Amino acid sequence: MKRIALFASGAGSNVENIIHYFSNSKVLEFPLIISNRSDALVHERAKKYGIPSHTFKKNDFEDGKVLKLLQEKAIDFIVLAGFLLKVPDNLLKAYPDRVFNIHPALLPKFGGKGMYGSHVHEAVVASGEKETGVTIHYVNENYDEGRIIFQAKCPVLPTDSPDDVAAKVHALEYEHFPRVIGEAVLGIKERQ
Ligand code: GRF
């Protein structure tokens, strides 16, 4: 069994989708959810599935508290699903090429600090892009710059609002993120 910790700061709909997708898996399990916000909806979702969820402050990520918990729980991989803090060096060193993120745009466009959630979709619409999508990538020391594993695209229509774009992007996330995590973790194949 590969043991994966899910990190999320917000609603956690991707977290729930991943847990649901692998609910009968004999090779992957999700024994831990970590957030930096105690009021994040992801904790409710965790409860629903009986998965322990914890909130840590920014400092706890940096000073090794989070790493200690991951090691105690024998976690093999980390998946960021709407997690807004920068992953500190101690975690990246302990999990080389074992931390994955999903970004709601076609990196390297619309990435970097401040480019998260609705900001991304607003920027995509404002710049008149004809397409956007999702990027699943390894996490390195810079925001949104790790090696790309997979991208999927969707059209942006001239009439689309940022919310319309967000809905299309979320649909792509639900469709692809669990499968790509599975493939990356199990080393089956990489794309792009
Ligand atoms: C997703 O769009 C993800 O790509 C981004 O944050 C959003 C999280 O949504 N990084 P949810 O919390 O999974 O509903």
Image: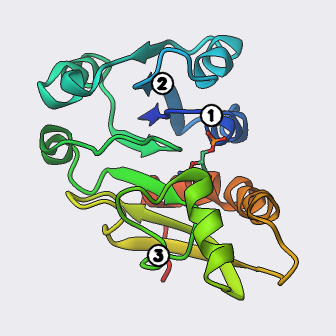
CB of mark 2 within 8 Å of CB of mark 1? yes
On the question of residue 1 being in view, the answer is no
- Mark 2 sits on what residue? 33
What type is the residue that disc 1 sits on? Gly
Asked if ligand 1 lies within 8 A of label 2, the reply is no
- Mark 3 sits on what residue? 107
Front residue of this view, candidates 75 and 14: 14
Query: With respect to residue 85, does 105 lie above or below?
Result: below
Compared across the picture, whether 150 is left or right of 87 comes to right
Asked if ligand 1 lies within 8 A of label 3, the reply is no
**Image point (72%, 34%), residue name:** 20
N-term-proximal mark, 2 vs 1: 1
What type is the residue that disc 3 sits on? Leu
Query: Crowding at label 3, few (<14), some or many (≥20) Cα neighbours within 10 Å?
Result: many
- Judged by depth in the image, the label closer to the viewer, 2 or 1, is 1
Alpha-carbon span between mark 3 and mark 2: 26 Å
N-term-proximal mark, 1 vs 3: 1
Compared across the picture, whether 120 is left or right of 2 comes to right
Tell me the element at label 3.
loop
Tell me the number on the disc at residue 95. Answer: none
Colouring = rainbow
Query: Crowding at label 1, few (<14), some or many (≥20) Cα neighbours within 10 Å?
Result: many
Alpha-carbon span between mark 2 and mark 1: 10 Å
On the question of residue 136 being in view, the answer is yes
The image quadrant of residue 87 is top left
**Image point (50%, 54%), residue name:** 116
Tell me the number on the disc at residue 12. Answer: 1
Front residue of this view, candidates 123 and 7: 123
Q: Position of residue 57 (x, y in %)?
A: 29, 20
**Image point (62%, 34%), residue name:** 12
Q: Position of residue 76 (x, y in %)?
A: 32, 37
